[in-house]
Image: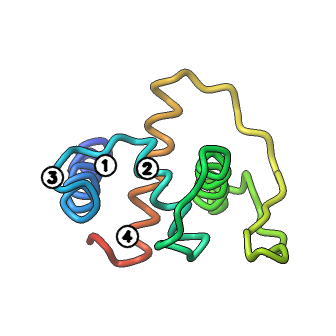
Amino acid sequence: MARDEQLKERWSLVVQKLSAQFAEGDTLDLDAIIYLIGVQELGQPHRKFKKDHKLDLMHIAICRLLEPYGYYEFEFYDEDKWPHYKVKEQLPALKAGEQSVLMKEAIVNYFLEAEYID
């Protein structure tokens, strides 16, 4: 199977499973999935977050998702147990579609690693 087709199939599976689990069947978009990963990485799933924290959670998720690609490196947890990352390499200039493909690939790999999908 072509790499692109496999990514599409796995991405659909991730969206389907997460939407069923967290959105009562509504389809989650890329940003919502990134947010969920941020909540997962923070390890405080039952906490209510303010708007500015939601952006921070998405940042945590993006850093975690792009860490295996060499763009970020985990540094430490602060006193509130929020993870902090440092930039190892600047992201290349990507078109919107290329950014989306990179993030979907990183998310699929994240859920493969977690054995949420296979």
Left or right position of 63 against 21 = right
Q: Earlier in the sequence, mark 4 or mark 3?
A: 3
* Alpha carbon distance from label 1 to label 2: 7 Å
Q: Please state which of the two labelled residues, at mark 3 or mark 2, is closer to the viewer.
A: 3
Which residue is identified by label 4? 112
Residue 25: give its label: 3
Could you classify mark 4 by the number of other residues whose Cα lies within 10 Å: few (under 14), some (14-19), or many (20 or more)?
some
Relative image position of residue 84 (x, y in whole percent): 79, 64
Q: Earlier in the sequence, mark 3 or mark 2?
A: 3
Secondary element at tag 1: helix
Three-letter amino acid code of the residue under disc 3: Gly
Q: Earlier in the sequence, mark 2 or mark 4?
A: 2
Residue lying at 37% horizontally and 70% vertically, measured from the top left:
112
Which residue is identified by label 1? 7
In this view, 51 is above or below 85: above
Residue 32: give its label: none
Residue lying at 74% horizontally and 69% vertically, measured from the top left:
83
Q: Earlier in the sequence, mark 3 or mark 1?
A: 1
Residue lying at 55% horizontally and 21% vertically, measured from the top left:
95
* Alpha carbon distance from label 2 to label 4: 10 Å
Three-letter amino acid code of the residue under disc 2: Glu
* Alpha carbon distance from label 3 to label 1: 22 Å
Could you classify mark 3 by the number of other residues whose Cα lies within 10 Å: few (under 14), some (14-19), or many (20 or more)?
few
Could you classify mark 1 by the number of other residues whose Cα lies within 10 Å: few (under 14), some (14-19), or many (20 or more)?
some
Secondary element at tag 3: loop
Secondary element at tag 4: helix
